[in-house]
Amino acid sequence: MGEVERPLVGQVVTVFRNRLRAEHEGAYRDELAVVAELARSMPGFLETKTFVADDGERATIVTFADPESHRGWRDHPRHREAQRRGISDYYSEYSIAVGETSYASAFVHDPQGPGETAL
């Protein structure tokens, strides 16, 4: 198992929920590849993960280190262009929730137990 990212107080987490219009899924994937790479290149970017529910709803969680870096991403001209394209072409519906982390905790099970090391 690799290094685990720990959530920290002060990070900004965006939860973006959406459903795609079936006729534009291919174009959406192309757009997503560009926008995801742009996000990864932004100062303060920490992580993005997307999950798809059985009913087709998608949820993307994006984390930035702080409000300033999140604003840089939110306001980036190419990201804004993708948002406009999403409304006009890709989404049948979406919602966005953004929050600054006020509490954070993490746990990782150590199969070797406390004080033991793998050989």
Image (cartoon, rainbow, N blue to C red):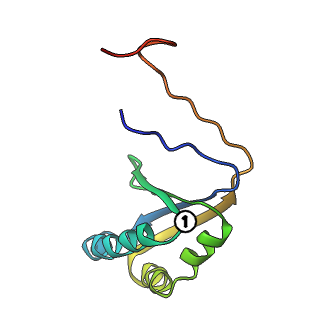
Q: Residue furthest right?
A: 102
Give the structural element (helix, strand or loop) at label 1. Answer: loop
Q: Quadrant of the C terminus?
A: top left
Q: How many marks?
A: 1
**Residue 69 image position (x, y, % from top left):** 60, 70
**Residue 96 image position (x, y, % from top left):** 59, 65
Residue located 48% across and 22% down the image: 109
**Residue 70 image position (x, y, % from top left):** 60, 69
Label 1 sits on residue:
44
Nearest to the observer: residue 43 or residue 70: 43
Residue located 67% across and 67% down the image: 67
Nearest to the observer: residue 51 or residue 44: 44
Residue located 42% across and 39% down the image: 3
Can residue 5 be seen in the rendering of this structure?
yes
Can residue 59 be seen in the rendering of this structure?
no
Left or right side of 4 for 2: left
Left or right side of 99 for 82: left
Nearest to the observer: residue 2 or residue 27: 2
Left or right side of 40 for 98: right
117 w.r.t. 65: above or below: above
Instruction: Classify residue 30 by image quadrant.
Output: bottom left
